[in-house]
Each structure stands twice: as C-alpha cells, then as structure tokens.
C-alpha cells in the first residue's frame, strides 16, 4: 500500500480524501495557491506545497507545477479529486512517466471516455442509445448556429472537457446559440484549458440519473446503484439522492449492467460514473461518463457502506475488488444538499467574503439516522472569487426517503452561515416542495417551480402559529432577563405580562403565555393551545425548540421589538408586542423602498469582461448589456425594459462589488 499520497485539488474534496487516507494510515500532501494558504485542506494534510497564484490556470491546473510538488514531496500516488486535472490524460501520463500512481482510470480510458465527444462516438459504436447531436469540432459561432438549426432547438452547447456545469448553455434560438457558443468557449478555456464545444439536442422534461461503477485492473466491475440528480440549476446539480425514487429494479439492473459493460469496453479501472437521461417511460439514454469521483458520491457511500475513495486507492495499488455485484445492497435512503456561496434572492449569483459565522449541524452516526457534512471551509475563512462557490455538502441518511428528508430539514435549519450570501433558504424550500417530496421532478424542476427566481417562502398558517408560539415564549424569557439585569424589579416574572401580540408574515396573533418549570403553554385567541419547550436563552443564535409534538429549529437574530427568524426557507421579521404596542404599531406608515429601476446594479462581486452597449445606445428588453465573470462563470446582464443608456460607470477589466452602479438609463 502507498505510504504517501498527494491530493491534486482543494476545498471539500481534498479534505474528504485526506480523511480516508488518514484512516488507512497513509501520509497526505496538500497543494495550495496564494488564495488557499490558510485553507482547511492545507491545515488537515500532513504536508503542504505552494504551487502558485490564486487563478486556477496559474496553479491548480498547471501540470508542471503539480508535478514539481509531487517530486518534492516524494508522493507515491496522486488523487485528483474532481474538476481541475482529474480527467486530464496528459496529467495521468506525466505521473506514469515518473512512476507515480494516478488514483483514477488508465490514460486510454480517460481519453476515450473523459472527452464528451469521443465518449459519445464510442457509445454509439457500442450500440448504446445516445442523445441526437453533432459530435464534431465547431469552428465559430456561425457554424454553431447552423448546426443548432440542423439538430433542432432547443440545443445544449457543452464543453468537451467540461464538468460541474461549466461551459454549458441551453439555446432556444439563433441569438442564444451565438452568445452561448462564445460564453461556453470562454468558460471551458478558463476552467479546463480546452475550449472545444459540441452541440446536442436538449431533451425537455428529462430526469438525470447516474450509475456509480467500480472496476479493478483484474477484469472485475460492479455498479453501486444509482443517484437521482434531477434538481439542477444552470446545469449544476443542487440536490442529489440515492437511490432514485423513480427507478424500478429492472430498470436499475439494465442501466447498471450497461454502465459496467461500457466501462469495461474501454478498459476502465477505479470509480467512475455513467450518466443517463431518463424519460417518463423509463427509457434511458447515455449522456456521458465522468472518469473520476463525483461530487455527489457520499449518497452512494451512505446507502451501500462502501468508501469509494478507499476503493479507488486500493485499485490504484493493484488490488482486486473485494466485493462482487451480489454483495452490493441498497440500505435506506440518502440525500445530499450542496451549500453554495450564492445569493438566492439575487438570482443565485455568486457571493464572496468572509465567513463570520460557520456552524454546521453536528455530524451523527446512529442506527436510525446519519448526518454527514463534507466541507472545506471554517469560521473566519474566506470564500474566494477564484474557485467553485461550494461551501459544503450536507448529507442525511435514514431507513426511508421520508425520514431522510425530515432529517435533512432539521439539519438545514440547524446550519448557521453568516457573512456571505448562501442558498440554505432555497434548499429548505426544496425539501418542503410537494413535487420533491413526492419524487415527481425533472431537470426542469427549478425553472418550472421558480420561474421568477427565489423570493423566499411564505409559510402556511400552521407553521406561523408554531413560530408565533415559540417566539412569544422566547420574548417572555428575554423580558425577564432584561428586568433582572436592570435591577428595577423584585418579582421579575410577575411584572412581565402574559398577554402578547405576535405579528409575522402579514398575520397578527393575540395570545397568552403561561409558563412553568418545564416550558410554556401558549393559548391563542381562538382557543388553540400549543405547548412550547426548549433551552433558548437571550443571545443564542440558534433556538432548538419543541412546539406541540414536533421539533422547531430557528435561526435567531435581534431586531427592534422582536426577532429576525429564519426557518424552512423563510426569512421573517417577527414582532412581539404588548396589546397597547400592537395597537400603536398598526398606525405606523410603511417605509417605501428606493427606486433603482433606471440603474444597472452589479448583482455580485466580479470582473467586467465585456460591455455590449455605450452611452446614447437605445436598448430593448432582454438585450445584453454587459458580461460579468465570477467564480469561473460568465453572467450576461440584460435590460429589463426598453431605454437609452445615459451613463456608463464601469469599464472592461474593472472589478466590481455588489450593487455597484454599472450604467444608468434615461
């Protein structure tokens, strides 16, 4: 077995590999850029080697620099994680040339299956059903438009060497095909050092289901069930689960056997993933093969009990698989939510900055549930604009899907993140969405259910009553504490009233709080009673309460006259007032928001890579105004209405902060 492994990656996947290597008694070496000098993976590894400036194309994907780190550290093997050099055959060749093991497939398999164009041709030759498209190289935007018309809109423009949603665009017409081609090429070149683009038919209303395969160098290959990855945004997976709520055993077996046969046809070894799109009749079509570990691998590990990183290392060491297909069993259900540094209230645009608070829920391994959090950040750390915006992968396991979802709801509510925009509210909303709960979703789920973006959640009255009861009891505790601190009252509890009004989400509840040693009984004006218990004390930013028979986890902030409460995807201002205060509050005028309709504001920190209009230009609704690059993604900002550009405040190459005014309109 190897004594020392270098992890040619960063962030949560580097930390994930280090954990398994440490358990196996293997020394680990991290690599890091200027931006990652204090990163968690650097702290966790036994050794660390600096490899260059912050941009990935000057550090993490420069083969010579990574090879220098391998040589200086004396590592016997390299685990590439995912992204970066994980599917780069030249990197695998460079390692082989110096006798260092690549913890992944052979060079030939990477070249055949890691390239999306080549892999599709091989799949077609092998008789695998594939999505219609054009697999040749595309010279320019004009040719992309011509091919798109031949294939038939809508089409998907994809980076040949791509992954993780980078270099992918859906085009519904000629204009979008032209724009998408250039943006896809730019992103592909920046992220993978390979700007080749291909085009395929975009199949509407599909499910995205993938098969995990594991093969050794002795001719053995197995599949470890499937993962449902249909909850996607901008072609980037957001929620994954295993198994799929859609597949039956016969379809699972057919997909699994086809995936293994395809892998073995190209001499594949190590862990890999064969991705399919599946229609409503359970017809499946080969999409691509990822010749690496997938981001969402933890859900497979949770339902099978197989440590995929360990198996990759053992296969790279020349060992045979210790299990056969008959040994693979599906146990329970697992769900993964990807926590991203992005603002769901601003169209999910990237957010960067310092994590002023980062408190994940406690990781748990119990007989009836598991909570797992794969992360690469820590409180006080910085989220950089140079890399993927993922903060963590939160996973739950339970015997049934319904139980796994409920465990995830509580875990999401318990996850504290401050200092940056993040998608926790959106993830909570998905976990409660009827279509997700029923398992009735496609890759169009987010586009269909949130066509105007995410604007938070309006909770039903039953939930609002539970929140009102909890916050009234919390407010009473805070009032008693204030009385004690002031020293002005002898019998603090007697002096604090029992009648309160709670205003939340446009509703008003008159209620009475009667406390005892075990908690409080809250009685509403209509006679409903709710029992509230919990150990919240003033100043705590997380309240783990029990209201009635169910748990209620609240993120708590202080506002004048009440609390800012975040729970189940909702961000609420809860005012708890005495009856007289409530009466006066109803007479107060509402504050009117400032008018920004004639301004183009920068929605995220980023770099201006293109200005598409100038002062005096008349623009139409939907017209491209400028392009902002952040976290390796290009974002085209468009006009919301017809107007004339009166002022341009930024130039190409400028770095902008959130809400900087890019241009103004008459």
Image (cartoon, rainbow, N blue to C red):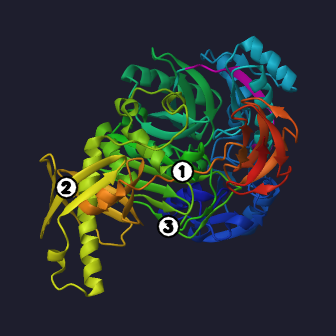
Residue 149, percent across and down? 76, 13
Residue 301, percent across and down? 43, 45
Residue depicted at x 60% and y 17%: 128
Residue 499, percent across and down? 18, 62
Which badge, 3 or 2, comes first in the chain's sequence? 3
Which badge, 1 or 2, comes first in the chain's sequence? 2
Residue sitting farthest toward the bottom: 487
Which badge, 3 or 1, comes first in the chain's sequence? 3
Binning the other alpha carbons within 10 Å of mark 1 as few (below 14), some (14 to 19) or many (20 upward) gives few
Q: Secondary structure at mark 3?
A: strand
Quadrant of the snapshot with the C terminus: top right
Residue depicted at x 49% and y 24%: 255
Please give left or right for residue 644 compared with residue 449 in the image. right
Binning the other alpha carbons within 10 Å of mark 2 as few (below 14), some (14 to 19) or many (20 upward) gives many
Q: Secondary structure at mark 1?
A: loop
Quadrant of the snapshot with the N terminus: bottom right
Residue on which the image places disc 2: 511
Residue 656 is one of the magenta-drawn residues = no
Residue 202 is one of the magenta-drawn residues = yes
Residue 63 in view here: yes
* Image disc number at residue 592: 1
How far apart are the two marked residues, 1 and 2, measured between alpha carbons? 30 Å
Binning the other alpha carbons within 10 Å of mark 3 as few (below 14), some (14 to 19) or many (20 upward) gives some
Residue 322 in view here: no
Residue range of the region highlighted in magenta in the rendering: 192-204
* Image disc number at residue 357: 3
How far apart are the two marked residues, 3 and 2, measured between alpha carbons? 34 Å
Name the quadrant containing residue 620. Answer: top right
Of badges 1 and 2, nearer the viewer stands: 1
């Amino acid at each position: 077995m190897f004594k020392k492994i270098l992890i040619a990656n960063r962030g949560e996947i580097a930390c994930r590999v280090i954990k398994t290597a440490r358990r196996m008694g293997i020394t680990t070496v991290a690599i890091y850029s200027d931006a990652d000098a204090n990163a968690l993976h650097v702290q966790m590894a036994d050794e660390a080697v600096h490899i260059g400036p912050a941009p990935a194309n000057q550090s993490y994907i420069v083969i010579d620099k990574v090879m220098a780190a391998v040589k200086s550290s004396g590592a016997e093997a390299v685990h590439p994680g995912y992204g970066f050099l994980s599917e780069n055959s030249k990197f695998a060749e460079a390692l082989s040339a110096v006798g260092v093991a690549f913890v992944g497939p052979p060079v030939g398999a990477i070249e055949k299956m890691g390239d999306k164009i080549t892999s599709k041709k091989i799949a077609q030759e092998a008789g695998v059903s594939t999505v219609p498209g054009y697999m040749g190289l595309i010279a320019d935007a004009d040719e992309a438009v011509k091919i798109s018309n031949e294939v038939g809109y809508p089409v998907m423009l994809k980076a040949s060497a791509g992954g993780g949603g980078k270099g992918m665009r859906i085009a519904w017409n000629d204009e979008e095909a032209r724009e998408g081609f250039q943006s896809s090429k730019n992103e592909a070149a920046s992220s993978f050092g390979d700007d080749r683009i291909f085009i395929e038919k975009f199949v509407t209303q599909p499910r995205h289901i993938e098969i995990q395969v594991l093969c050794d160098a002795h001719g053995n290959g197995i599949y470890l069930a499937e993962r449902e990855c249909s909850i996607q945004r901008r072609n980037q997976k957001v929620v994954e689960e295993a198994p799929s709520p859609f597949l039956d055993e016969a379809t699972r077996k057919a997909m699994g056997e086809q995936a293994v046969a395809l892998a073995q046809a190209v001499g594949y070894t190590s862990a890999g993933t064969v991705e399919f799109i599946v229609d409503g009749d359970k017809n499946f079509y080969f999409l691509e093969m990822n010749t690496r570990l997938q981001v969402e691998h933890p859900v497979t590990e949770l339902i099978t009990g197989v440590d995929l990183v360990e198996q990759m290392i053992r296969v790279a060491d020349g060992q045979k698989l210790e299990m056969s297909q008959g040994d693979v069993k599906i146990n329970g259900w697992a769900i993964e939510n990807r926590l991203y540094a992005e603002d769901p209230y601003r169209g999910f645009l990237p957010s960067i900055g310092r994590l002023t608070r980062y408190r994940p829920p406690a990781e748990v391994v119990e007989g009836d549930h598991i909570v797992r959090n794969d992360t690469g950040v820590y409180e006080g750390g910085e989220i950089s604009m140079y890399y993927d915006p993922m903060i963590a992968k939160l996973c739950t396991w339970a015997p049934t899907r319904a139980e796994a979802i409920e465990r995830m709801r509580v875990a999401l509510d318990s996850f504290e993140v401050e200092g940056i925009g993040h998608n926790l509210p959106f993830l909570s909303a998905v976990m409660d969405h009827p279509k997700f709960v029923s398992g009735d979703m496609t890759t169009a789920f987010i586009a269909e259910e949130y066509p105007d973006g995410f604007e938070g959640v309006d909770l039903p009255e039953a939930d609002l009553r539970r929140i009102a009861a909890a916050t009234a009891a919390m407010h009473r505790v805070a009032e008693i504490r204030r009385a004690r601190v002031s020293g002005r009252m002898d019998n603090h509890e007697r002096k604090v009233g029992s009648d309160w009004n709670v205003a939340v989400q446009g509703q008003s509840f008159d209620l009475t709080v009667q406390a005892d040693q075990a908690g409080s009984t809250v009685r509403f004006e209509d006679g409903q009673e709710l029992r509230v218990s919990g150990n919240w004390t003033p100043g705590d930013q997380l309240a783990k309460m029990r209201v009635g028979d169910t748990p209620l986890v609240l993120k708590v902030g202080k506002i004048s006259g009440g609390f800012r409460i975040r729970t189940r995807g909702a961000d609420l201002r809860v005012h708890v007032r005495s009856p007289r205060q409530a009466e006066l509050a109803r007479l107060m005028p509402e504050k009117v928001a400032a008018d920004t309709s004639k301004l183009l504001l920068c929605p995220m920190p980023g770099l201006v890579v293109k200005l598409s209009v100038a002062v005096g230009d008349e623009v139409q609704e939907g017209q491209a105004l400028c392009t902002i690059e952040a976290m390796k993604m290009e974002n085209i900002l468009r006009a919301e209405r017809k107007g004339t550009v009166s002022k341009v405040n930024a130039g190409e190459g400028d770095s902008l902060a959130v809400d900087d005014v890019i241009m103004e309109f008459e």
